[in-house]
Image (spheres, rainbow, N blue to C red):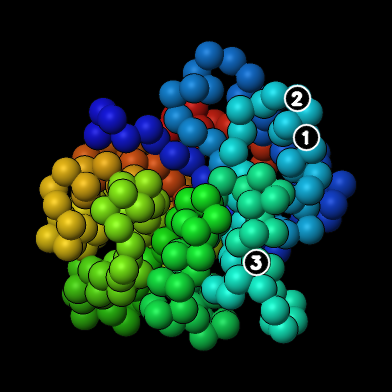
């Protein structure tokens, strides 16, 4: 775990108006302006329409806050109305992009092949994908969570080089724990992050490669539950939805991460 820098990423989803977004990113940046800030990496993932403002604030103030997008087109360019390309995100200074968030898989019918194509196009433009995996309640109740996430990981990394997998971030987000207040136990998080993600990557690539990939847990992470989850050996950070919308809470999570 020592060489994997903890990563706390805030997924704002479709929240905040433009002024609120500017206020939030400033609050986060100012709350983190001290020495501790360097221990964990902090990243915000605002809506597309706020990326230019976030870029200006972060660059202008020389704040060490990373940012990225919540989705990317699998296509390079062309007649894809409404989509945003990886080249466009790169131009806006994005370092990260979520691919395969459960809300994209569920409401936009994104399958593993599309998620894999998105991860590839992100890498091609120098952006690190955060590949999201995780089971619904039915799979969890049937005890199939490890097999489910392992299959999503295998399909999601298909064709990626070992070097890319070492940079990749994988987020395990059980769907039943997202936005529900229902947090997985630290042991639940470790089971999937360890067995379905790290062990699967070791099998597909090598133990050395798998040891470098950062694995996040996501699902109702809050300041009062992050420490227990982060204490698990294969959990290297958190993907945070609701609690990333309050500057103070998100900064607290970064400090605790
Ligand atoms: C998410 O959707 O990525 C997420 C983890 O949301 P929440 O923290 O609100 O459960």
Verify CB contact (< 8 Å) between mark 2 and mark 3.
no
Ligand 1 near label 3 (Cβ, under 8 Å)?
Answer: no
Q: CA distance from mark 2 to mark 3?
A: 27 Å
Q: Secondary structure at mark 1?
A: helix
- Residue at the spot of label 3: 85
Residue at the extreme top? 35
- The tag on residue 57 is 1
- Residue at the spot of label 2: 61
Sooner in the amino-acid sequence: mark 3 or mark 1: 1
On the rendered structure, is 93 left or right of 225?
right
Q: CA distance from mark 2 to mark 1?
A: 6 Å
Q: CA distance from mark 3 to mark 1?
A: 22 Å
Percent coordinates x, y for residue 196 in the rendering: 21, 62
Question: As displayed, is residue 103 above or below residue 178?
Answer: below
- In this view, the mark in front (2 or 3): 3
Residue at the (43%, 46%) spot, across then down: 238
Residue 255 visible somewhere in the drawing: yes
How packed mark 2 is, by other alpha carbons closer than 10 Å (few <14, some 14-19, many 20 or more), is: few
Residue at the (30%, 70%) spot, across then down: 158
Q: Quadrant of the N terminus?
A: top left
Of residue 141 and residue 50, the one placed in the foreground of this image is 50
Q: Quadrant of the C terminus?
A: top left
- In this view, the mark in front (3 or 1): 3
Res 249 quadrant in image? top right
Percent coordinates x, y for residue 244 in the rendering: 60, 46
How packed mark 1 is, by other alpha carbons closer than 10 Å (few <14, some 14-19, many 20 or more), is: some
Residue 187 visible somewhere in the drawing: no
């Amino acid at each position: 775990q020592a060489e994997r820098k903890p990563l706390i990423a805030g997924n704002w989803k479709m929240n905040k108006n433009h002024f609120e977004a500017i206020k939030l990113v400033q609050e986060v940046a100012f709350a983190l302006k001290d020495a501790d800030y360097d221990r964990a990496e902090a990243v915000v993932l605002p809506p597309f329409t706020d990326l230019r403002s976030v870029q200006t604030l972060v660059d202008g103030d020389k704040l060490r806050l990373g940012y990225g997008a919540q989705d990317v087109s699998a296509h390079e360019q062309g007649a894809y109305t409404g989509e945003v390309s990886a080249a466009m995100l790169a131009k806006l200074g994005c370092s990260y992009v979520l691919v395969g968030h459960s809300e994209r898989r569920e409401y936009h019918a994104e399958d593993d092949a599309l998620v894999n194509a998105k991860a590839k196009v992100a890498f091609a433009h120098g952006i690190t994908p955060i590949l999201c995996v995780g089971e619904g309640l039915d799979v969890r109740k049937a005890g199939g969570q490890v097999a489910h996430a392992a299959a999503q990981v295998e399909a999601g990394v298909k064709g990626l080089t070992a070097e890319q997998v070492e940079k990749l971030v994988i987020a395990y987000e059980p769907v039943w724990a997202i936005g529900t207040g229902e947090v997985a136990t630290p042991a639940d998080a470790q089971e999937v992050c360890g067995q379905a993600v790290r062990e699967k990557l070791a099998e597909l690539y090598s133990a050395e490669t798998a040891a470098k990939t950062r694995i996040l847990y996501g699902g109702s992470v809050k300041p009062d539950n992050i420490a227990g989850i982060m204490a698990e050996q294969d959990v290297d950070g958190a993907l945070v939805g609701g609690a990333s919308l309050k500057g103070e809470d998100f900064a607290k999570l970064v400090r605790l991460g």
